[in-house]
Image (tube, helix red, strand yellow):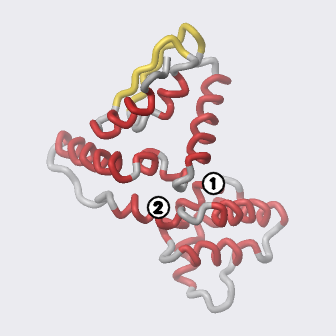
Amino acid sequence: MTPDPGWPPTDFERLRPALEGCAEGSLPANVALLRLAMEAAAPEEVERALMGARSGASADRAARLGEALAMWRANPQAFGYVKAVIGGVEHSGAADEPGQGVASWAQAFDRLAQVSPEGGVALYALGNPDLLRAATLEVVERMRGWGLLGPQARVVEVGCGIGRFVEVLAREVAHVTGLDVSEGMIARARERCAGVP
């Protein structure tokens, strides 16, 4: 994988891991796009990287990159959404005590619950509710396939966020409990799950 002419090599190298992961199939398109958006300076840089990586690639690699490019174009909100969520969370520093770290993350997720609850729990959905729902249903289907669900099952989800799994699982198990460090996320989960049996 080589950059197109005129692309500064350092810019391309920043994006190479996500492009390679997408091309080889080890990263789903939406996760590759998330990583590209996190590293890129502008949305046009993501598109240019995907288009450049496709040129000269084998058919299967080009197809996977093409899928990512189509998803990128179908989600014009993705770049701004990713940057806004990432920009709203402090990622550096360390807490002096474990309790301080927990409190710091609780505050961060409380802020995200106000600004972007879905992005706070599943940024790989790129701000697209359909992608979020599909990812949720994929995990639930996997749990079903493993025989973890059923009318006798009881589930505890630690880190339930906005309750997207609690909402779906409530219809498939005897009881589901969602726990989260963020009161804001718990409030969103209660809203989401109100009226769910």
Circle 2 sits on which residue? 82
Please name the residue shown 47% across and 61% down the image: 81
To which quarter of the image does residue 2 belong?
bottom right
Query: How would you rate the neighbour count of disc 1 (Cα within 10 Å): few for under 14, some for 14-19, many for 20 or more?
Result: some
Question: Residue at left 54%, top 15%?
Answer: 173
Viewer-nearest residue: 79 or 32: 79
Q: CA distance from mark 1 to mark 2?
A: 17 Å
Quadrant position of the N terminus in the picture: bottom right
Decide: is 70 above or below 179: below
Which residue extends farthest right?
A: 59
| SS of the residue under disc 2 | helix
Residue 40 appears at what percent x and percent y? Answer: 51, 73
Residue drawn where x is 77% and y is 76% of the image: 55
Secondary element at image label 1 = loop
What residue sits right under mark 1 in the picture? 27
Label number found at residue 71: none
Q: Which residue corresponds to the image point at 59% horizontal and 40% vertical from the top-left?
A: 133
Of the numbered discs 1 and 2, the one sitting upstream in the chain is: 1
In front: label 1 or label 2? 2
Determine whether, in the image, residue 93 is placed left or right of residue 158. Answer: left
The three-letter amino acid code for the residue at tag 1 is Leu
The outermost residue toward the top is 152
Q: Residue most toward the left?
A: 96
Residue 111 x, y percent position in the rendering = 29, 50
Q: Amino acid at mark 2?
A: Val
Q: Quadrant of residue 152?
A: top right
Tell me if mark 2 has few (under 14), some (14-19) or many (20+) residues whose alpha carbon lies within 10 angstroms of its own: many
181 horizontally vs 164: left or right: left
Q: Is residue 150 above or below residue 134?
A: above
CB contact under 8 Å: marks 1 and 2: no
Q: Position of residue 114 (x, y in %)?
A: 33, 48
